[in-house]
Amino acid sequence: MATKKGRVEDEGLPEWFATFADMMTLLMTFFVLLFSMSTMDPVKVADLAASMEHNLKGGKKPKVKIKTQSQIKRDVQEVIQKMDMSEIAKVSHSPKGVSITIDSRYAFGMGSADLNSGIYPFLDAIIPIMSDRGNKFPISVEGHTDNVLPTGALAARYPTNWELSGARAAAVVRYCISKGVPGGRLRAVGFADRLPAGTSWRQSRIGVNDETVQAANATPELQSQNRRVEITFLAVG
């Protein structure tokens, strides 16, 4: 609007702009809600990060090929097939990472944290994968037990399954380090009986109750499955 002195007064924003702003606010709220309800897959994020690191090096090809989680899983599967050790070790892929589950019957004696010689050939075969400079994922070695508490002389050394499972994980870590795996990339973790075989990644995030642990150890066969060691290339450190 022109004034008597010829100046134009500011009439403010048009009326439709308020409606437009309200609509944009509602849309933003809607998409934030969708994002908060979604579940990001750390494995895919890790693969994407590895691919970006491989490709975005200032236009130069990196000297070391960066491995993705999927590639590590294939490498481990090839080792298991080549050595015909499908009964001893199994590989799986979850949001946690790539996990190698080793049956403890081939790794440790009953109630012992000393490595059996039968596990050495398999560990020797996967150590190159663990030591590969292109493998940028931290490695967690995890010990698991059944729900039977140590007794007798064993209890004097390992009062509970927490100590026993931790000692088994540490034994594997020590061997891997002796074969050249960088110690800074390894971690030894003991879970006692709290993550029975078959526990999903989501269940492990919230914890397993006592009733579930008891049911998962109801028979000698189930207990045997729970006495295991897992080596995981972690998607998220």
Image (cartoon, rainbow, N blue to C red):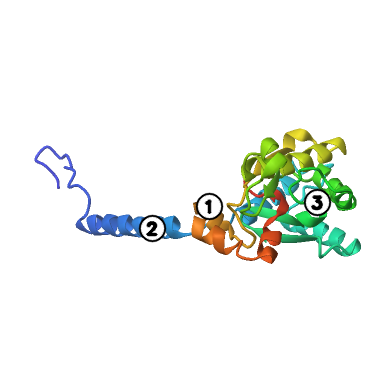
Name the mark on residue 187.
none
The residue most toward the front is 152
Q: What is the x, y in percent for residue 170?
A: 74, 39
Between 230 and 216, the residue placed more toward the observer is 216
Q: Nearer the viewer, mark 2 or mark 1?
A: 1
Q: What is the x, y in percent for residue 92?
A: 70, 61
Q: What is the x, y in percent for residue 101?
A: 73, 56
Name the mark on residue 107.
3
Mark 3: few, some, or many residues within 10 Å (few <14, many ≥20)?
Answer: many
In this rendering, would 122 be left or right of 99? Answer: right
Secondary structure at numbered mark 2: helix
Q: Amino acid at mark 3?
A: Ala
Residue 114 makes an appearance in the image: yes
Q: Residue at x 36, y 55 (%)?
A: 28
Pointer 2: what residue?
33
Above or below for 175 versus 25: above
Q: Amino acid at mark 2?
A: Leu
Above or below for 150 versus 35: above
Image quadrant holding the C terminus, namely top right
Secondary structure at numbered mark 3: loop
Secondary structure at numbered mark 1: helix
State which tag comes first along the sequence, 2 or 3: 2
Pointer 1: what residue?
205
Between 194 and 73, the residue placed more toward the observer is 194
